[in-house]
């Protein structure tokens, strides 16, 4: 195996080793096998281009073209020209997939599903890194800088994964890079000849390197020892440094791990994670549960609370997490005077559902679950540690069904000062219209509870709002103001806006994300589907705790305590709502029970009432590239595609011209010399290099000997050589007929004696095509010489004279 082939193989192995760090991020891992096959094809293209040989930039260009064609076949075959060449539709589809992939990376919890967009990003990234490594290490023979793209690939995986990519993947990636360096060092050392060829085991004075599997000379052994030592230091030293939170071998995440009893957790917006974790083509079941509760209308499965409001979005705060206690503490602010019912719920999650937060009935008092879970006391949530998620879980939850009355809510005392201060914060960037609208709606309401009910009724009934999942969620400080003006949206708009307005009124508020109760099944279980994803506001009342409200019209169920009590002095004077507002559980499928018709349109990104904003690149842009630009790109792609075929096409053309000359000249001198030249080039294609120092007869004998020609083919070669001697040296050369057929007979003999690899190279990459490169180099040098020796003024005058036909030289 040649040195460059060995280097190319090691470059492929090093790239795949570094790409292995991406495996924990997505599931399944089939994308890596696709990337490995395409990477091998790209590497083989580079090896073939270097054998021709092509210049370094042309080799890289040929590999890049093959990458584009392979990605077209893999990702956009239906939109490509002939299923291979990327046209305007394929380019538009590529843009859509890239945009979708970027969105999916930020949406899905780890491990994310391999969507078409994520697959394109992964495979393209591996191929581009592989191309850079191959170019540096193989084409330009500099393996050390190739570690930079490999490091970039590993760093992306380490940055996206929670707690780093893990010491095992670091070890594999580093071993791949060291293998590449070792292959380059062995190749360089092999070119030094006998410098290290002293007699010894396996080297009896021959000056050759030891056979594979031998211990190797001292430089090899020393290099392996240094590599192993460096790798060991890289693993051990970070683990021993306390400032690195345990190092590579320590527990991942921000906490101290199970049993640590401390630490913090800060994560991405779970609303976004929830949206896209559930964004599947069909309305699949997320989880199902069996409960002892007689009425499941209020059995919302809560995932997490968003309590940090910056004016533009709601996010979970960075909180301290602890081990999951045997029994969770009593909910903050819940008085013993409030009616409660203890229930048990057995929950099973789907195998595809991967969420970092655990869906729980609120408030949970005991959770029986296996795995690496941590407890966040403020939000009373369980969050996965070190990659733990909800995929395919079964767990038991004991929880409370808290049933306050409207009188208890209306007479609730003021919350503690620290809680009031934390959960009524609103940023200065919040538009004034939010505060003024909240005050206008709740004008005359004597209590915080009355204000909360008025806000809920204004959104759900009296304010003229409509439920519309086609409206984008929006962002920025003006998002709530736009929603209050347009009065169209889905649960994200309603919950975010009511919580923000409640805070401006001095009512502690936050937003909860989770699922509505789902649909009862004939077997006694309840199924929670994609369309049951939901967001709702929670307001705090001392003595009751965090209390759910439902401002979103046509979604979920209004809790009983949200109807104001008119029987006592705490009544605010508002009429009692009609009983029709209370929604009984439906036996219809989940999608029909909880979604408006707008949720069902084709192409919708709706997940329950949580809607993914439409991706602007989901459809081809109306403008797009101009036809001329597309034609230019297609022409450039065709030219680059034809570049590796130039030697083959040139050889076929030259052979055709020589055969035509040999038949048209009637066996004259020119025909005989052209036929002889074709014989020499044919032998060159099959590995017999031409030697201009030999006479025609000796050259023919050399071809017969090296090419191992049969007697008939050998006789044909001698006849052509004799005809050449006649044409060159005889006073009156005699014509010899049938020379073209003789050359074809020699070619057939060389082909039958050659191996399959030699025959394939003679056809696709003929060695005699080197004449074309030499001719081009000669002409280019001649052109440069003429441009250097001629004065610019003379060149311009000559060009002007040519362009003015009226003034011709005599």
Image (cartoon, rainbow, N blue to C red):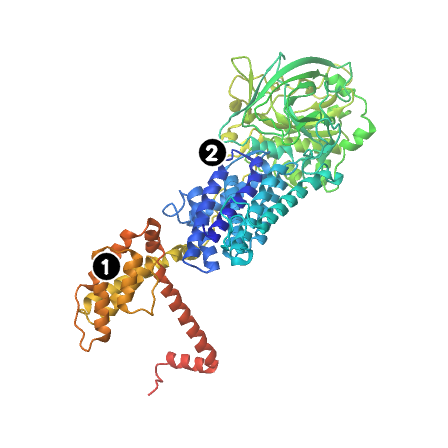
**Going from the N terminus, do you reach mark 1 or mark 2 first?**
2
Secondary structure beneath disc 2? loop
Q: In the visual, does 168 lie left or right of 729?
A: right
Q: CA distance from mark 1 to mark 2?
A: 73 Å
Q: Nearer the viewer, mark 1 or mark 2?
A: 1
Q: Residue furthest right?
A: 417
- The numbered disc on residue 602 is 2
Compared to residue 126, the image places residue 634 above or below, namely: below
Q: Residue at x 38, y 78 (%)?
A: 803
Compared to residue 203, the image places residue 563 above or below, namely: above
Circles 1 and 2 in contact, beta carbons < 8 Å: no
Quadrant where the C terminus sits is: bottom left
The foreground one among 283 and 108 is 108
* Percent x, y of residue 727: 22, 73
Q: Residue at x 45, y 81 (%)?
A: 790
Residue pointed to by mark 1: 714
Characterize the local packing of mark 1: few (<14), some (14-19) or many (20 or more) Cα atoms within 10 angstroms: many
Q: In the visual, does 242 lie left or right of 356?
A: right
Q: In the visual, does 731 lie left or right of 266?
A: left
Q: Residue at x 27, y 64 (%)?
A: 700
Q: Residue furthest bottom?
A: 810
The foreground one among 38 and 581 is 38
* Percent x, y of residue 720: 22, 65
């Amino acid at each position: 195996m040649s040195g460059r082939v060995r280097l190319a193989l090691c470059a492929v192995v090093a790239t795949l080793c570094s790409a292995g760090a991406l495996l924990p991020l997505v599931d399944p891992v089939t994308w890596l096998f696709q990337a490995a096959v395409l990477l091998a094809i790209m590497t083989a293209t580079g090896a073939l281009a270097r054998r021709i040989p092509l210049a370094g930039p042309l080799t890289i260009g040929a590999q890049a073209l093959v990458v584009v064609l392979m990605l077209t076949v893999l990702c956009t075959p239906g939109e490509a020209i002939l299923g291979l060449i990327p046209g305007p539709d394929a380019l538009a589809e590529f843009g859509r997939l890239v945009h979708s992939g970027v969105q999916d990376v930020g949406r899905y919890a780890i491990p994310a599903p391999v969507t078409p967009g994520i697959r394109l990003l992964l495979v393209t990234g591996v191929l581009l890194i592989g191309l850079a490594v191959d170019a540096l290490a193989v084409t330009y023979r500099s393996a050390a800088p190739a570690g930079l793209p490999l490091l970039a690939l590993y760093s992306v995986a380490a940055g996206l994964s929670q707690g780093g990519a893990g010491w095992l993947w670091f070890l594999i990636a580093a071993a791949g890079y060291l293998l590449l360096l070792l292959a380059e060092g062995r190749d360089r050392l092999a070119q030094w000849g006998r410098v290290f060829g002293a007699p010894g085991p396996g080297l009896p004075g021959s000056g050759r390197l030891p056979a594979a599997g031998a211990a190797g000379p001292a430089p090899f052994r020393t290099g392996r020892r240094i590599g192993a030592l460096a790798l060991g230091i890289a693993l051990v030293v970070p683990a021993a440094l306390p400032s690195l939170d345990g190092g590579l071998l320590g527990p991942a995440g921000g906490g101290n791990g199970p049993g640590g009893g401390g630490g913090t957790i800060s994560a991405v917006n779970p609303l976004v994670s929830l949206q896209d974790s559930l964004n599947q083509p069909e309305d699949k079941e997320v989880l199902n549960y069996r409960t002892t509760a007689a009425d499941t209308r209020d059995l919302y499965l809560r995932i997490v609370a968003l309590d940090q409001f910056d004016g533009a979005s709601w996010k979970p705060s960075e909180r301290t997490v602890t081990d999951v206690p045997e029994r969770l503490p009593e909910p903050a602010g819940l008085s013993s005077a409030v009616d409660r019912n203890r229930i048990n719920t057995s929950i099973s999650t789907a195998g595809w559902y991967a969420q970092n937060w655990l869906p729980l009935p609120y408030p949970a008092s005991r959770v029986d679950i296996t795995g690496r879970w941590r407890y966040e006391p403020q939000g009373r949530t369980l969050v996965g540690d070190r990659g733990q998620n909800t995929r395919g879980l079964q767990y038991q939850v004991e929880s409370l069904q808290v049933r306050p009355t409207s009188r208890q809510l209306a007479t609730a005392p003021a919350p503690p000062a620290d809680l009031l201060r934390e959960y009524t914060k609103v940023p200065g960037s919040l538009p004034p219209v939010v505060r003024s609208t909240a005050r206008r709606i709740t004008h005359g309401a004597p209590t915080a509870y009355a204000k909360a009910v008025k806000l809920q009724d204004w959104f759900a009934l009296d304010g003229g709002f409509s439920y519309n999942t086609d409206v984008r969620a929006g962002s920025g400080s003006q998002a709530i103001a736009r929603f209050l003006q347009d009065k169209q949206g889905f649960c994200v708009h309603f919950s975010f806006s009511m919580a923000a307005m409640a805070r401006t009124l001095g009512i502690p508020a936050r937003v909860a994300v989770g699922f509505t109760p789902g649909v009862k099944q004939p077997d006694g279980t309840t199924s929670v589907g994609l369309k049951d994803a939901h967001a709702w506001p929670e307001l705090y009342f001392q003595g009751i705790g965090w209390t759910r409200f439902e401002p979103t019209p046509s979604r979920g169920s209004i809790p009983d305590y949200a109807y104001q009590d008119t029987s006592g002095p705490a009544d605010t004077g508002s009429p009692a709502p009609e009983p029709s507002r209370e929604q009984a559980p439906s036996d219809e499928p989940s999608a029909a029970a909880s979604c408006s018709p707008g949720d069902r349109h084709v192409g919708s990104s709706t997940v329950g009432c949580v809607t993914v904003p439409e991706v602007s690149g989901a459809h081809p842009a109306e403008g797009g590239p101009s036809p001329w630009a597309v034609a230019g790109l297609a022409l450039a792609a065709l030219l680059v595609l034809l570049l590796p075929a130039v030697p083959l096409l040139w050889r076929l053309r030259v052979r055709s011209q020589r055969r035509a000359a040999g038949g048209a000249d009637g066996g004259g001198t020119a025909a005989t010399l052209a036929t002889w030249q074709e014989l020499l080039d044919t032998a060159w294609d099959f590995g017999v290099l031409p030697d201009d120092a030999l006479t025609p007869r000796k050259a023919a004998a050399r071809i017969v000997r090296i090419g191992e020609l049969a007697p008939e083919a050998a006789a044909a070669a001698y006849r052509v050589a004799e005809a050449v001697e006649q044409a060159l040296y005889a006073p009156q050369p005699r014509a010899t007929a049938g020379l073209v057929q003789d050359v074809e007979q020699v070619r057939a003999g060389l082909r039958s004696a050659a191996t399959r690899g030699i025959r394939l190279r003679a056809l696709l990459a003929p060695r005699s095509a080197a004449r074309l490169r030499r001719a081009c180099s000669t002409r280019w040098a001649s052109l440069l010489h003429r441009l250097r020796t001629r004065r610019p003024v003379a060149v311009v005058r000559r060009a002007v004279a040519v362009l003015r036909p009226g003034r011709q030289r005599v």
